Amino acid sequence: MGALFGKSKKKEESRITEQDKAVLQLKQQRDKLKQYQKKITVQLEKERLLAKSLLSSGKREKALLLLKKKRYQENLMSKTDSQIDNIERMVQDLEFAQIEVQVVEGLKTGNDALKTLHRLMSLEDVEKIMDEAQEGIEYQREIDELLSGSLTAEDNDAVLAELDQIIQESLPEAEEREADEVPQLPGVPTQEPERKKIKEHRKQPELVAAS
């Protein structure tokens, strides 16, 4: 179990680049400076109230000394603002540089893919295919023009006559097929059934006995 967790942890660490570490450190420094600003802001407000209390007590020198200290800390605060701005600008530059690297890598991959495709199909092959396609388009256009009304009245009459001829030629074949498909019904019987003959044969002795 420990070995498995150790391997997964190493994989996660390997994904972190030096740029990621630099960005993380800069953000940590920025957060520390902001925490320091909050702390100094609260302290400056307290010192201002204390200086006001000293003045009301007649302790002018102590109040003046406290205000000088407050002024010094305010100057530090302005420097802290400048440092925070520089850090945030550096973070933005690093993050944007990482995006640029990813874009460049993507362009490189795409360029390699294009080179591979170009090796599979040369410029001569493309030109040949385009010429053949253009010839096919032009040929089809000529056919469309012929069929779309560029035939003369004589041509149309000849086409109709040929159509009628084909229809007439196909009529005997259709009649023969219909004749073959008609079922042959059995003929009407011309002789009497055998049962009727046997019955009449049995009646003849009876007629002789009666006579």
Image (tube, helix red, strand yellow):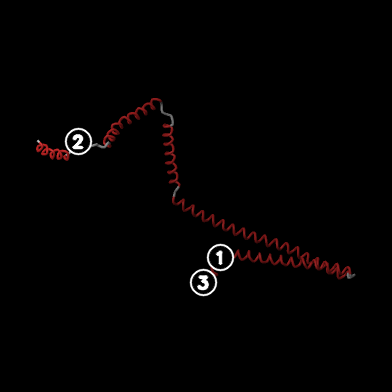
Establish if 190 lies above or below 100. Answer: above
- Mark 3 residue type: Leu
Location of mark 2 (residue): 189
Spatial CA distance of label 2 from label 1 is: 103 Å
Identify the mark nearer the N-term, 1 or 3. 3
Mark closer to the observer (2, 3): 2
Q: CA distance from mark 1 to mark 3?
A: 17 Å
Residue pictured at 49% horizontal, 54% vertical:
113
Identify which residue, 118 or 54, lies in the foreground: 54
Tell me the residue that label 3 is attached to.
Answer: 4
* x, y percent for residue 100: 59, 57
Regarding mark 3 in the picture, which secondary structure is present there?
A: helix
Q: Secondary structure at mark 2?
A: loop
Of the residues under marks 2 and 3, which one precedes in the sequence?
A: 3
Residues packed near mark 3 inside 10 Å, few (<14), some (14 to 19) or many (20 plus)? few
In which quadrant of the rendered view does residue 199 lie? top left
**Amino acid type for the residue under numbered disc 1:** Arg
Point 61% across, 66% down: residue: 21
Task: Locate residue 52: give its quadrant.
Answer: bottom right
**Residue at 45% across, 47% down:** 123
